[in-house]
Image (spheres, rainbow, N blue to C red):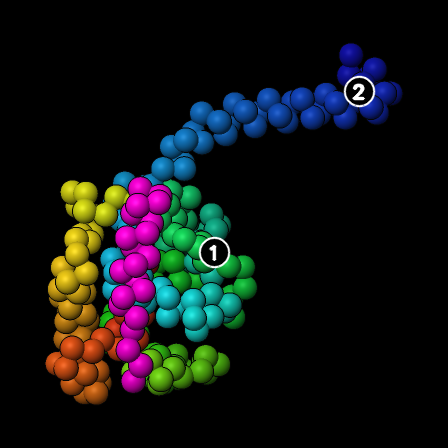
Amino acid sequence: MFSWLEKNPFFFAVAVFVLIAYAGIVEILPDFANRARPVEGTKPYSVLELAGRHVYIKESCNACHSQMIRPFKSETDRYGMYSLSGEYAYDRPHLWGSKRTGPDLWRVGNYRTSDWHENHMKDPTSVVPGSIMPAYNHMFSKNADIETAYAEAVTVKQVFNVPYDAEGMPKLGSFEDAKKQVNVEAQAIIDQMKDESVKQAFKKGEIREIVALIAYLNSLK
């Protein structure tokens, strides 16, 4: 049988295709639905985290940093547990990336702190000697767009059934309710920061982009 297949390339190719297709069905389909669902513990981004994600995209951070840890020892030793598809269930758009001018950031919330991010964004070489990343001082003077972030949260809740307000999930409510929660989250971050201009702005009811960005980076775990 095998010698006959070897002498008939067309039928050999068909046999290989059928074998691979069958193996794929057996291995992939039974677990496909489970892998497409959110991993246990995965939550939608809060409004402040979404505002920070908007800053992350606007500044093209994803052009130099990926958000996908491959299942290789060299990657897991450096960045932590490899990425699972269900962890991205609430990401729109996905920011997997492929180019790493800087390190992968998918689990950066597990090993960096708010004050570290503050110093890094203000003066990268102060915490990473030799870094080629530019400083982002303008984030310390520009306000985060909380209204747009809230509008996105409401939209994905209505269109994609993202489970905001479910038990254990971030709460939305009215915009006023959301702003109260944003202030609570922002206060926790600002308490760990040193920049006085950011602190004074918050007392006036303003939340700087750097605070929102740190909230987003802290959520990547």
Q: Say what amino acid the circle numbered 2 marks.
A: Phe
- Judging depth in this view, the residue of 145 and 104 nearest the camera is 145
Could one spot residue 216 in this view of the protein?
A: no
* Residue 113 falls in image quadrant: bottom left
Label 1 or label 2, whichever lies nearer to me, is 1
Q: Residue at x 37, y 55 (%)?
A: 80
* Residue 171 % position (x, y): 18, 52
The residue wearing badge 2 is 11
| Residue drawn at (38%, 32%) of the image | 34
Residue 1 point in image, percent of width and height: 78, 12
Q: Give the residue pinned by disc 1.
A: 96
Give the Cα separation between the discs numbered 1 and 2.
39 Å
- The part of the chain drawn in magenta is 141-161
Q: Mark 1 touching mark 2, by CB under 8 A? A: no
Q: Residue at x 50, y 69 (%)?
A: 64
Indicate the secondary structure of the residue bearing disc 2.
Answer: helix
Q: Residues within 10 Å of mark 2 (few under 14, many from 20)?
A: few
Identify the residue at image location x=32%, y=52%: 155
Q: Residues within 10 Å of mark 1 (few under 14, many from 20)?
A: some
